[in-house]
Image (cartoon, rainbow, N blue to C red):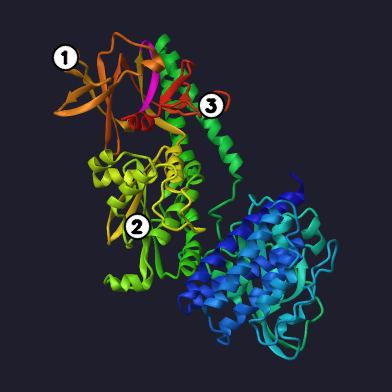
Amino acid sequence: MSELDAYRSLYIAESRENHENIVKNLLVLETGSDEGAIGEIFRSAHSLKGMSASMGFEGMERLCHAMEDVFQEIRNGSLDVGPDLVDDLLAGVDDIEAMLDDIEAGGQGIPPDIDDKVRMLKSWIPGGDDSSEPVSVPAAGPEPDYIPKEDAYGGGGNFPSNRYRIRIQLSDSCDSRNLRGMITLSNLEEIGHIESLIPERSIIEDGDFNGVMEVEIISDAGREALEIITSGTDVHLAEITETDTVVTPGPPPPEPIVHEKKTEKTPPGGKAEKSGQSKEIKNIRVDITRLDRMMNLIEDLVINRGRITQVAEKYRIKELDETLNMVERSVSDLQDLMMKIRMIPLNHTFNRFPRTVRDLAHREGKEVEFIIEGGETELDRSVMDGLNDPLLHLIRNAIDHGIEIPEKRVAAGKPPKGTLLLSAKRDRDNVIITIEDDGGGINADKVKEKAVRAGLITSEAAEALSREEAYELLFCPGFSTAEVITDVSGRGVGLDVVKNSIESLKGTVRVDSIEGTGTKFELLLPPTMAIVNVMMVRINNRRCAIPVNNVVEVASLSEERIHRVGQQEVIVIRDEVLALDRLDDMFGRSERSEILLVLQNQNRKRSLAVDMIEGQQEVVIKPLSTIVGLCRGVSGVTIPGDGEVVPVLDVNSILKEM
């Protein structure tokens, strides 16, 4: 990766954080005046503008500058926040996202209609629609140690300001110190006049910059603004010292300062002053490919741990046993730590949806209060990656099919504004995500009628279905209850996609609804898919693995308890009739099956005949290769210590055969 690519990666990562923060606080601002939201938007827009200027992305800088001007009018109270203004601001935010996508792909992020986009935002400012002149961008290459920013002082004149001495030390883990230094320097220049800079600007921009710089600046923005600019995950230490107050008609000439390496210390028994407090870095950014590589190495350790255990059991060497016990503890601790590192709060996905809900509700003419709970619940990144589309489908369905228009809700005795709840919680070894609305609910009879008309089920079979069983028809491919096809729903694509996506994550989805009251979808997901606890069994002298959380009972298999219903063998256990599988098509017919396993997933049960149980162990599940392709009933393979490739049964698909 070139140095420019490293800079671009850091720029994209931080810009997307700022973009998300702007969207979130814009939606807060729309619900009512909120000084905190305006401040957050200002900070993010200003940071994004400064970073873009440092990187030379002129289009992004111009758009952010125009957006910043609009927010200034809002903060001053001269511009009221209304739906039309928020629509235009959100359109500007969408433009920012599209420009970031282009920059990430290697472009410059300058759409052909950039002038129109800037002019649209400027039109909200009285006399501020002249956007034909682009904002100047600092040229690349060596520059003077300081660049006067007269506009920071309102065009000159006497003004009171404070002189500050700032010492910034970047973290050792910062991958792009030059870029981080230039971003910080550019942001400081936006709010004041830099009198002196150590080291020289050319070194920070394109030299051997060690991550430490000292700045003396005159600014009337205040200490809080300086603290915001000099903070961040890549900053290890930021010392801000106020030296004196000055009154000057314009930017003074630069004066050198003594380069001090003294660090303020906390006095004994007291707390450090804010200006000199050492801020230990708490978080670092790590490329996700590095985490994936580390996870693969840990998975190899888990596999080899099993192999060493088998060797130790064979030779029974005391010293080897003692060493193995220590290695097993270390590998287990490392495995647990790695799993925690890969866990991501669901807020990373949940925070994308308030904008979606807002836009869909406006388009449908509905009023929706969107509530998010449990966003701190964590999932493995591999599970999180496949969760966005299913949740989007369910949220769109809740607004389009579930929540009624205000007039209809009032007529039904409900408040005009509907409620949509997106929540998450941990339940033992699983994560449950709920999407619940207080809309019109689902009519089970209507679902049956639609299914019969679509040829999915016969009239006789439909009559025999319970309400819960009727709801399962919603997940059939091509099924839809929409009377009119829209760009939101009604094209027969939706809930079947949701179910397939969730099942690919080793999860399940179920629906419950009360007509006239509302509908609730529950997604049951494993926190991780990489390393699981399985039960090793043998069928016809062939080994297979079954996830332990799907095994609810182990019993002896006696032939007199086996009966036949049509072509299916069944067995009676505790007054419950369960289908009996032998998996002949996978492993061949065994005549020595003596053990019965009862498998369960949610409310479905099925039994499985096996020859013997070898025990439980933690294994790494690898997906089937593209060469092998999909295999019904098998979710992946694992390699225990003896090196044999063992299939892992997909209990979900086995239970579907009922």
Q: Residue 541 lies in magenta, yes or no?
A: yes
- In this image, 121 relative to 144: left or right? left
Q: What element carries label 1?
A: helix
Q: Residue at x 28, y 70 (%)?
A: 412
Amino acid bearing label 1: Glu
**Which residue is identified by label 2?**
436
Residue 165 pos. (x, y %): 68, 72
Whichever of callouts 3 and 2 sits on the residue coming sooner in the sequence is 2
Span shown in magenta: 540-547
Q: Is mark 2 on a helix, strand or loop?
A: strand
Between residue 641 and residue 331, name the one nearer to us: 641
Any part of residue 44 in sight = no
Q: Residue 249 lies in magenta, yes or no?
A: no
Amino acid bearing label 3: Gly
Q: Which mark is residue 235?
A: none
Q: Residue at x 45, y 49 (%)?
A: 494
- Spatial CA distance of label 3 from label 2 is 36 Å
Q: Is residue 458 above or below residue 106?
A: above
**Which residue is identified by label 3?**
629
Which image quadrant: the N terminus?
Answer: top right
Between residue 326 and residue 126, name the one nearer to us: 126
| Neighbours of disc 3 within 10 Å: few (<14), some (14-19), many (20+) | few
**Residue sitting at the far left:** 575
Amino acid bearing label 2: Glu
Which image quadrant: the C terminus?
Answer: top left
**Which residue is identified by label 1?**
560
